[in-house]
Amino acid sequence: MFVQKKRIFLILSSKLIQVIVRFILGGTFIYASFEKLLNPIEFSRIIQNYKILPEFLINPVAVILPLIELIFGIFLIFGIFVRNSAIVLSSLLIIFIMAITINIIRGIDFNCGCFSISSSKHNSNGFLLIARDLLILIPGIIIVLFHKEK
């Protein structure tokens, strides 16, 4: 059993696996940031529709959140502050999962604003959004637990 755990550790901490998961997580967040950065007003409407944040935080979050996604995604791609970047992006995913769960419980039809801010793309199946976010969280967990600092 110990040998098997050590083998899993060696595989998940290998340079190749770490590069792959960095590119998956970093690339996902870089891609997710683009449309939000280009359309902050529309993104602020999506945030407002979640009905979670106080009104005075909606616009700052609409501007700052995509910048965080972009910057920490770039950090991961280039191998800068790897563990900290993975912690930040994984924390965002956990926050997104909580926000989606709250709206599922409330029965609110919403556009998650994840990869597209188009108002025609309402994702009423919040369970699929949660499942997708949990899958995206896996690379972050692998980085946080198995990344070897230089």
Image (cartoon, rainbow, N blue to C red):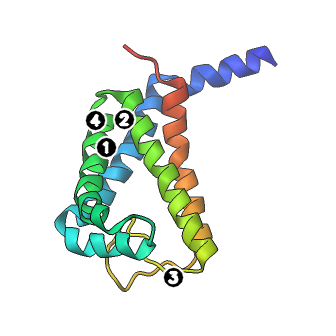
- Residues under numbered marks 4 and 1 in contact, where contact means CB atoms less than 8 Å apart: yes
- Tell me residue 63's x, y (percent): 22, 59
Return the residue found at the far right. Answer: 1
Secondary element at tag 1: helix
Q: CA distance from mark 2 to mark 4?
A: 7 Å
- Disc assigned to residue 75: 4
Which one is closest to the eye, mark 2 or mark 3? Answer: 3
Task: Say what amino acid the circle numbered 2 marks.
Answer: Ser
Relative horizontal placement of residue 140, taking residue 47 as reference (left or right): right
Give neighbour class at mark 1: few <14, some 14-19, many 20+ (Cα, 10 Å): many
- Tell me residue 112's x, y (percent): 44, 70
Q: CA distance from mark 4 to mark 1?
A: 5 Å
Give neighbour class at mark 3: few <14, some 14-19, many 20+ (Cα, 10 Å): some
The residue that disc 2 covers is 85
Task: Say what amino acid the circle numbered 4 marks.
Answer: Phe
Q: CA distance from mark 2 to mark 3?
A: 31 Å
- Disc assigned to residue 73: 1
Q: Residue at x 23, y 50 (%)?
A: 67
- Residues under numbered marks 1 and 2 in contact, where contact means CB atoms less than 8 Å apart: yes
- Tell me residue 85's x, y (percent): 36, 35
Task: Say what amino acid the circle numbered 3 marks.
Answer: Asp
In the image, residue 113 above or below residue 109: above
- Residues under numbered marks 2 and 4 in contact, where contact means CB atoms less than 8 Å apart: yes
Which one is closest to the eye, mark 1 or mark 2? Answer: 2
- Residues under numbered marks 3 and 4 in contact, where contact means CB atoms less than 8 Å apart: no
Sequence-earlier tag: 1 or 2:
1
- Residues under numbered marks 2 and 3 in contact, where contact means CB atoms less than 8 Å apart: no
Secondary element at tag 4: helix
- Disc assigned to residue 109: 3
Relative horizontal placement of residue 148, taking residue 11 as reference (left or right): left
